[in-house]
Image: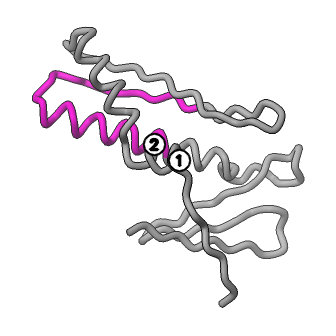
Amino acid sequence: MARAKASIGTIDYATTIAVGHHTLVADEGPDLGGKDAGPAPYELLTAALGACTVITLRMYAERKQWPVTSVHADIHFVREGDKAHIDRVLSIEGAVDDAQKKRMAEIAERTPVTLTLKGGLEIRTRLA
């Protein structure tokens, strides 16, 4: 399904990520020894959840033929001690009523990336 290849050289901590025919750069901020050349790993995680959320909600609105003009998802990864959670705030614009917005928020709870994160995921690591 999805595949990414990440590579790092000797420059702390600039990482090149190849995803399909796209190239992304990830890095850490100066406080962690990087140069902030791109989003940090948890920023990429929140970006993936945000993208999946708004794409799914746009598809849902189109299928329902609801007059949604835009959907925004503000995703915040929060670490509190040894616990972590994600806060997601949705903003839905267009001539939709509160019931439609509530339904879209319910759908957001079942987007593919949301379900993957909530369900946990086995990661199998091996050497090439």
Classify residue 102 as left or right of residue 81: left
Instruction: Check disc 1 and report its element: helix, strand or loop.
Output: helix
Q: Which mark is residue 114?
A: 2
Q: Residue at x 22, y 23 (%)?
A: 68
Residue 76 in the image: x percent, y percent? 61, 31
66 in magenta: yes
Q: How many marks?
A: 2
The quadrant where residue 6 appears? bottom right
Instruction: Check disc 2 and report its element: helix, strand or loop.
Output: helix
Classify residue 75 as left or right of residue 14: left
Most distant residue in the top direction:
98
Q: Are marks 1 and 2 in contact (CB under 8 Å)?
A: yes
The C terminus appears in which quarter of the rendering?
A: bottom right
Residue 32 in the image: x percent, y percent? 87, 49
Q: Nearer the viewer, residue 64 or 22?
A: 64
The kind of residue on which mark 1 rests is Leu
Say how the picture is coloured: one colour
Residue, disc 1: 117
Distance from disc 1 to disc 2, alpha carbons, whole Å, reads 5 Å
The N terminus appears in which quarter of the rendering?
A: bottom left
Rate crowding at label 1 as few (under 14), some (14 to 19) or many (20 or more) other CA atoms within 10 Å. few
Q: Using the image, determine if residue 23 lies above or below residue 65.
A: below
The kind of residue on which mark 2 rests is Thr
Classify residue 57 as left or right of residue 76: left
The quadrant where residue 95 appears? top left
What segment carries the magenta color?
Answer: 49-75
Q: Nearer the viewer, residue 28 or 116?
A: 116
81 in magenta: no
